[in-house]
Image (cartoon, rainbow, N blue to C red):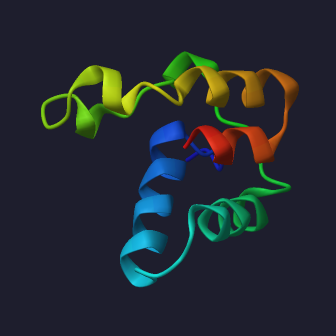
Amino acid sequence: MSDQPTVSNVFRRAQEIRLSSANASFDDIRSQIVNEFSGQPFPSPAFLTIPELDNIAPEEDWTAGLPIVLRGIQTEDWNEIAHGI
């Protein structure tokens, strides 16, 4: 099993943080994501999707941050990835 996270893994982790800390700001969530994932391999741009949202949200809503996530992957910057998530 690969220890490389996927964009979906990062997104699900952000959702978990939000559920456990309802009063957390988006900056708090972004900071926690960066702290948890820094030092890990970057997600593959080949899997730049969040499949579980395909049927429950309008595509323009859940895809809005993906270009930022892709830029973060390309520049190897967890801050950008977390910002896009």
Image coordinates for residue 83, horizontal then vertical, percent: 66, 44
Q: Nearer the viewer, residue 45 or 26?
A: 26
Image coordinates for residue 38, horizontal then vertical, percent: 81, 57
Rendered residue at 66%/22% (across/down):
70
Rendered residue at 36%/32% (across/down):
62
Q: Is residue 42 left or right of residue 26?
A: right
Rendered residue at 60%/20% (across/down):
67
Residue 59 in which image quadrant: top left
Compared to residue 28, the image places residue 15 above or below, namely above
Rendered residue at 84%/38% (across/down):
77
Residue 4 visible within the image: no
Report the quarter where the C terminus lies.
top right
Image coordinates for residue 33, horizontal then vertical, percent: 66, 61
Compared to residue 71, the image places residue 50 above or below, namely below
Q: Nearer the viewer, residue 3 or 30?
A: 30
Compared to residue 39, the image places residue 36 above or below, namely below
